[in-house]
Structure formats: structure tokens, C-alpha cells
Image: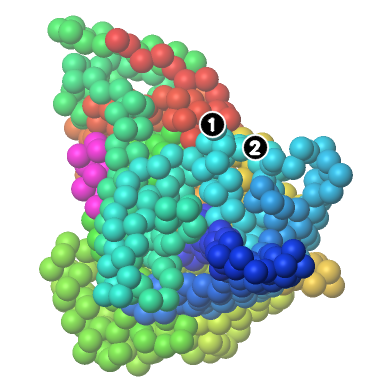
Amino acid sequence: MKAKFGVKRLSVAVLMGLSIAACNSGDNVSDADNASATVAQVKTNEENIKATEASSEAESSKSEVTYNIWNKEDSAGNLNVKQDGNFIDAKLKMGWNNRRIETEESIEVNEQGFIVSQEIKGISAFGAPIDEKFSYTDGQAVWKSLNEEGQAASDGDQFYVPIDGTGVSNSLLVKALSKDPDNKIELLPAGSASLVKLDSVTLDNGTEKKQVHLIGIAGFGFTPNFAWYDDDYNFFATDGGGWFGIIPEGWGREHLEQLSEMQKKADNQYLKELAQKLTHTINDPILISHANYVDVNTGELIEDQNIVIQDGKISMIGKMWPKLANGKVINAKGKTLIPGLWDMHGHLQKSDGLLNIPAGVTNVRDMGNTHDNITAIERMSEANEIIGADVYRSGFMDRESPYAMKMGKTVDSLESAKEAVDWYAENGYPQIKTYSSMEPEWIKPLADHIHSKGMKLSGHIPAFMTAEEAVDAGFDEIQHINMLFLNFMGNIDTRKRLRFTMVGEQAGEIDLDSKEVTDFIAKLKEKGTVIDPTLMVFRWLLQAKAGVVNPEMQDIYEHLPVTVSRGFKTAVLDIKDEERDAYNKSTAALSAMVKKLHDGGVQIVPGTDNIAGFSLHRELIDYAEAGISNADVLKLGTIDSARVVGADKTNGSIEEGKQADLVFIDGNPLENMNDLRKVSLVIKGNNLYKPDEIYQAIGVKPFTTSMEIPK
């Protein structure tokens, strides 16, 4: 249930469905005792019985289910599903922050439960229109949406996977998988799905008891999607990683929480088994010979060095060949070593390490999460129970409003905001991230309180406040490049989509060499304000066009499972053709601003706020294409990021005494930043990872062949 932008690019169309099972019932009337009945009377009775049975069966095939969608604190929407025989209609309404999903879906199935007709219309989270159709007739499957179209010969036993939808088709897929002898079905336009039953529990709401089963579907993404189904494989409920959950009316949040705990355990177990299989631990000393490594402090390539790792740390770097008892040797000739990369804007899920680590991302600053989820990820990563990066937490806060992002702490007064800060401080958070609904008048006293706790303040610029005002009030860091452009567009309502569309329409018209912009950048430098631009995600947003592979995703498109990569051909905002030139000009302006910030001495840090691992590479490539030198880009993504979170004494560069976070590259990113994709080995402490092994386990085509690990 993921892909990301802002929070996650969440879709409730993940394993949410309905019952289409029909109960065949009728009056079991017998006329055998009517000895005086004539043949005509018997025939009449039989016809009446059949008519009654048909009427009863028709009624029993009708059903209506409404599911409640919950965020961390309250309702986020609902899904209503009506079924009449083989015809199904579903309506989805869901909202969070400035995202609003409204989708209607109509489906017809055949007697075997396979879809023969499907139509989906609506509005996606950021406002782009949805119009998608599928049909199967006479051995031919045909599909068409605003993003793609295609057809294929079929026996009717394949399932089309819609790009957008309410989730009904996924529920039908589970039912079909349950009937397949191999629990496997081919998908359209490509791929396959398989099913496994994991756990069961009986719920009681006081008037009804229901047994439900935890089902995993593999094939839709990098890891299986888990949800709960009843005895007849009808969808019942699911938890979306602590962010959103869904359950039918009549069943409360307490039931969802009960299921959530069991779902988390199953998910954890799956990830633990992958970690055991894909982590190679060497407790003996490791000698890396003939290493060419990047000194990110100077930007130089240091050639033909020997690097020794002991107890997870770099104990020696030099030309000398050391004598090591029981040491393991890795020949790094032909590779370039860089320190582990940093993603300074993640929203972590437990499976993200499967994307971060093979990409060489060994450190992630989480910029907003539920406390339970992020602390569990931190603990499990440190214990090597899951594959994961080192975690640096930010506490998330928003003010109560219709646009509030209810994920961390939602406050209704300055005093409650200060209390939330106190809670985060007591629970080990070094930083607070505020969101768009915060009151401008609160920022200065809140910043003073945060600083008194030894913490930093960052976030979105509050509605009706400018970035410069926020910096003057005490912001230590600003998230997202759009917030800097909005600084020159007046005091706008940053809770709404205006924070995207105004930038798309007007950013290209701002003179970046003007005194106003130059003075603002000078103030950022003077104040030591850090900028977390998430450049790639805004370039992705402004360039997204239905039916065209997004330029930001072009170089990974062919490497990912088709059920993932198809999302890279979708529109996000509702951009009209006549607006494209302005949006393209603004896209270029975003990159130019990042270059100007860097040249002006403002500390920028690379973050993703999007799909893990791959997006960090794209962010760094975008910096290089904007004109920042490759050496400086690597510095931003390693030691500079470590310094911002106070970890530069132990991480962030290849130096004696520091943690052994080492990434082996086929190529030289000092010469070509695109070489970052070609990671051939990752060392994190005593653990070694082969990227091609991890990628193949999650359905990704590797970018290069991994190095062999000494036995």
C-alpha cells in the first residue's frame, strides 16, 4: 500500500473488496402428501416452487457492504460496495491532508468469478482524472485508460490489474486464487499473483462472531500485500502499516487494532526470513584490497588502498598489507568505494530496507511516522531482524483542521503543541517536523520551546506564512523546494493543492537573480537554515503526464515489477495541455534554485519522500544535472547529511574509527553520477549484502552483477 509523495501515495485499492458469494436458498415444499392432487396441480406447485426459489436466490445474491477507513485518530473515508448477482458497484471516498480520492467502479464477472467488464472513473489523490476500462469477449482481453491501452489473447482466466480502483478487483482475485489448484494466476498486462494463508482468528462484536484469515498476495509489489478474509475468501479488513486501516461497519477500531497486531507479526516474520536469507555476516576481520575510495571531505579519489574492518568499524586505511588472523579478503580492484548514502526525507516502512540497502542507502532520517511503527523499525534494524538502514527520527506534528495529516501528534493549542514537544523529547526524538495547518503565531514560542529541549524545528511552512517569516521565527530547516518558491508568491494557504499548482504555474517566472531572491538566500546562509528540497519528487510531480513514462523514473522503469512501474506513466496533478510549457519551465527553475542555494553556501540535504532507494539516486543525479559538481553531490549525500543530524563523528565518510558503511560501485560516480545505480556490494558493520540477490528476491531486475563474498 505504498509508493510515496508527501506521505505515501496510498491507495485503498489494496486488498479491499466485498462478498459476491450467493446463498442458494428456497422453500423445500413437497406435495407428496397430497394424495388427491391432480397432475396439473403437481405441475403448478412445482412451477411455484421454482419461481419462489428463483426469487429467493435473486434476493440472496444482492448485498451491500460499507467499510470505514480510519487514519491514526479518526475517520478518513469509506468504501461502499453493492452487489447484484454478477454485477458489482463500488464507491470510494477518502481524504487526508490536501489529498482527496473519489472513485467509482463497476464490474461484471462471469460464473467462474473472472472479470468480463470493468469501468473505473474518478479523481486521484492530487486531482488527476481517472478513466479506465477493461473487457473480455471472445478470447480477447482489451484495456484502456488515460495512461495506457493494450489487448491480449486470453482464455478468460487472467486478471487485469487496474492502475486505479476501489480494490474490488483485488478481492475477486483472492477468491479466484483460492480456487486455483496452484494458488497462482497470471495477470494482465503482465506478471502473476500467488496466495498463501498465514493466520486465523475469531472476532466477536457482541452480536456476531466471525472467523477471518490473514492472506498474503505476492506479485503486486516488492513484498506481499496482507489482508483479512472470511471463510469464503471475502475481503474483511486490513491495516496499512499504521497509517490507514479499513474494516466493515459494525466492527470497531478495537477489532482493527486486534487484527493489526497479528498482521504486523506475520509481516515481521516474512521480513525476518528474508533478512536471514539475504544477510551475510562476517565476524572475522575483513581486508578490502586494492580499493579506490572517494574521500568525500576533499572530493578526491584515493587509489589502491587497503581497508581493514574489525568489529564493524574501519580500523585501518593505507598501502600496507596487514597481517590478519582468520581475515577475509575482498578484492575491490575495478570498483569505486563510497560511504553509505543518506536519505534525509524518508517515511519508513519495514520493507523499505529491501530497497535502501541494495541501493547503498545505509542511513535514513524519517520525517514523519507513527511512533509505534518507526520505533519498531529502528529496533528491528539495529537487531538485524530486518534488512534496514540506521534510523534517525523526527517527531511529526500538525494542528487540528480539515487538512490535518493525522499521523504523529495532532494539537489544538500552543500549550498542547508544547506538550507534544515534551513527549517527543522524552521519547528520544532530536527533531520536530511541523505541518501545514500549524498557526503562524505559534511558531516562534514553539521554536523557543523546541530549542530549549536541545531539539531542532523543521517542516512545511504553515498556511498564510512565508518561508522567510518561518526562518525569522526559528525554523532550523525547511522541507520541500516548493516552499521556497511560495515565499515569493504571498501568504498562501499551504494546506491546499495551491502549494503544488501555484509553483507549477508561476515558479518559472521568478527571477532567481533578483535582489529579493538573493537576499533571501543570504539570510538562509546567515541563519544556518538547512534546506531539504526533495527535488526529484517535485520534478516528478510537475512532469507527470498520462501515458508517458515520467522522466524521473525513466532509468528504472524497465527494472521494476510491471505492477509497480505502470504507476510511473500516470498523471498526478490535473495539468492541462496549455499549461505544459509553464510547468516545464517551472521544473527547470526548481533545479536552478537548488544550484543557486548550493552556490550561495546554504546547506542542502538530499531526501526522497518517494519510493525508497531508487529515488535517492535520482535526487543526487538531479543535483548533478543542475550543475553541482559530482564531488559536492556525494558530499551532500554522505558527510554533510551526517553532520546535520550530529552523526559525522561516527558515520558519513570512509575514515579510520568510523562505522563501516561502504558501498562498492561498478564505475566512478565522481565521473558519472548515473553509476550510483550500479551497486555491486554493500557493507554495513559486520553485515554484507549482495544487491542482485536482494533485488531478485523482490522482483527487481539488478543493475549489475554483485561481487562474491568470501566464505
Which numbered disc covers residue 209?
A: none
- Amino acid of disc 1: Asp
Query: Residue at 29% across / 84% down in the picture?
Result: 411
Compare residues 388 and 640 and report the one nearer the observer. Answer: 388
Query: Residue at 34% across / 39% down in the picture?
Result: 270
- Amino acid of disc 2: Glu
SS at circle 2? strand
Foreground mark, 2 or 1, reads 1
Q: Dot 2 corresponds to which residue?
A: 186
Which numbered disc covers residue 182?
A: 1
Q: Considering only vertical position in the picture, is 65 above or below 419?
A: above
Residue 710 in view: yes
270 relative to 453 in the view: left or right: right
Name the quadrant containing residue 328: top left
Compare residues 127 and 431 and report the one nearer the observer. Answer: 127
Which residue range is magenta in the image? 376-386
